[in-house]
Amino acid sequence: MITVDEISSEVMDIIRTVHDPEIPVLTVIDLGVVKKVTVEGKRVFINLTPTYSGCPAMDMISDDLKSVLKAEGYEAEIKLILSPAWSTDMITETGRKAMEVYGIASPLEPSNDILALTEDAKIVPCTRCQSKNTKLVSQFGSTACKALFQCNDCHEPFDYFKCLK
């Protein structure tokens, strides 16, 4: 039995080709939803943690993982794990940078997140011009895990990925 820290680069390279359908610049590894990978011969067992309970992307991610592994001769079994819960701390630094380039502001720390979402604090940087002169437009952006902001300087709207701890 091989665990995620020891698995072959071939299997990890295959898994890294699967992206979050809601944020296509993030791989499932960068998003931090892959919790455990075990390889037994040509069978791959993957434990996934959803970003939040009922996340609609998890079915597609599971199907995509099975599909890419099958194409390379592996049989995959996916298990959803709810504990420990996923948090935005699990997004890799590479993932955070990719989100910013894509136009989604990375999650702030919990206390700042609350200020940004409830107190109209000017702390969420615009992904286009980096100004913090931004305003909350809606508690919900393109998905439930994001809020919609607008920059008061360049006037561009952008999503902010809410902090989840």
Image (tube, rainbow, N blue to C red):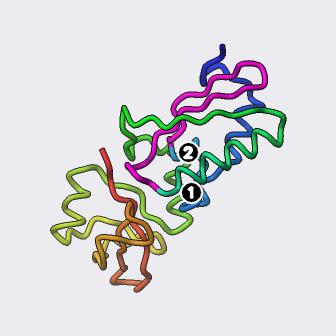
Q: Is residue 18 left or right of residue 149?
A: right
Magenta span of residues: 32-55
Name the residue carrying label 2.
30
Label 1 environment density (alpha carbons within 10 Å; few <14, some 14–19, many ≥20): many
Q: Which mark is residue 98?
A: 1
Q: Is residue 154 left or right of residue 62?
A: left
* Front label number (2 vs 1): 2
| Residue at x-position 36% and y-position 79% | 150
Tag 2–tag 1 contact (CB < 8 Å)? yes
Give the quarter of the figure containing the N terminus: top right
- 71 in magenta: no
| Circle nearer the N terminus (2, 1) | 2
Q: Secondary structure at mark 1?
A: helix
Residue 22: x and y in percent read 54, 62
Q: Secondary structure at mark 2?
A: helix
Which three-letter amino acid code belongs to the residue tagged 1?
Ala
Which three-letter amino acid code belongs to the residue tagged 2?
Asp
Picture quadrant of residue 106: bottom left
Residue 160: x and y in percent read 39, 65
Label 2 environment density (alpha carbons within 10 Å; few <14, some 14–19, many ≥20): many
| Residue at x-position 74% and y-position 39% | 14
Residue 44: x and y in percent read 69, 28
Picture quadrant of residue 41: top right
Q: Is residue 130 above or below residue 109?
A: below
Residue 20: x and y in percent read 58, 54
Q: Nearer the viewer, residue 111 or 29?
A: 29
